[in-house]
Image: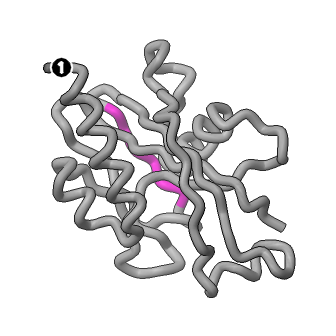
């Protein structure tokens, strides 16, 4: 059974492009990297790095220090009914912790074919609009809003 605690990782390049991946089990469901923790005590940063590696083949450990950043934001949402069977009976809500990952322009993506069938790099505003989940779009916009505040 899955644990109803997860991470979302917005992967982006310095030019403002964001990586979106299309789910294999739901056509046209574009999203950032997401995934549940493996155990209740798994560190959220470790879970984020693991999910990035599993879903995109990008090795966070090989990137410069501080490429993976905790956005210090979490949300709680209702688990879509079609995915509730993955959780213990009666579990209907999930808590998601947001991260960002800056990758080099040359980053290569290798999808896990059982999980995702396509990927694309989009300008952040387009990526935010294309996300199936409104909160995923909000995470992208929050990241770029925060980046602009730091550069002012």
As drawn, is 82 to the left or to the right of 26? Answer: right
Query: Among all residues in the image, which is located at the extreme bottom?
Result: 82
Magenta-tinted stretch:
107-112
Up-down: is 107 above or below 118?
Answer: above
**Where does label 1 land, which residue?**
151
- Main SS of the magenta part reads loop
Residue 37, x across and y down, in percent: 73, 49
Q: 14 or 144, which lies in front?
A: 144
Residue 22, x across and y down, in percent: 40, 67
Residue 95, x across and y down, in percent: 64, 56
Residue at image point 44% right, 14% down: 64
Check the image and tell me how it is coloured: one colour
Determine crowd level at label 1: few under 14, some 14-19, many 20+ residues with C-alpha closer than 10 A: few
Up-down: is 51 above or below 150?
Answer: below
Q: Is residue 111 magenta?
A: yes
Q: Quadrant of residue 108?
A: top left
As drawn, is 75 to the left or to the right of 15? Answer: right
* Label total for image: 1
> Can you say which quadrant of the picture contains the N terminus?
bottom right
Q: Is residue 135 magenta?
A: no
Residue 9, x across and y down, in percent: 48, 44
Q: 63 or 41, which lies in front?
A: 41
> Can you say which quadrant of the picture contains the C terminus?
top left
SS of the residue at dot 1? helix
Residue at image point 16% right, 32% down: 15
Q: 96 or 124, which lies in front?
A: 96
As drawn, is 152 to the left or to the right of 18? Answer: left
Q: 140 or 15, which lies in front?
A: 140
As drawn, is 136 to the left or to the right of 36? Answer: left
Residue at image point 49% right, 52% down: 33
């Amino acid at each position: 059974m899955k644990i109803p605690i997860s991470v979302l990782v917005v992967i982006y390049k310095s030019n403002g492009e964001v990586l979106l991946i299309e789910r294999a089990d739901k056509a046209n469901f574009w999203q950032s990297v997401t995934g549940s923790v493996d155990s209740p005590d798994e560190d959220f940063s470790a879970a984020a790095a693991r999910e990035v590696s599993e879903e995109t083949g990008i090795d966070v450990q090989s990137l410069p220090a501080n490429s993976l950043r905790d956005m210090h934001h979490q949300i709680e949402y209702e688990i879509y009914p079609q995915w509730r069977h993955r959780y213990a009976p009666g579990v209907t809500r999930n808590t998601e912790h947001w991260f960002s990952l800056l990758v080099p322009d040359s980053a290569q993506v290798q999808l896990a074919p059982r999980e995702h069938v396509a990927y694309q790099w989009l300008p952040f505003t387009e990526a935010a609009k294309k996300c199936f989940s409104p909160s995923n779009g909000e995470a992208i916009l929050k990241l770029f809003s925060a980046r602009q505040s730091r550069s002012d």
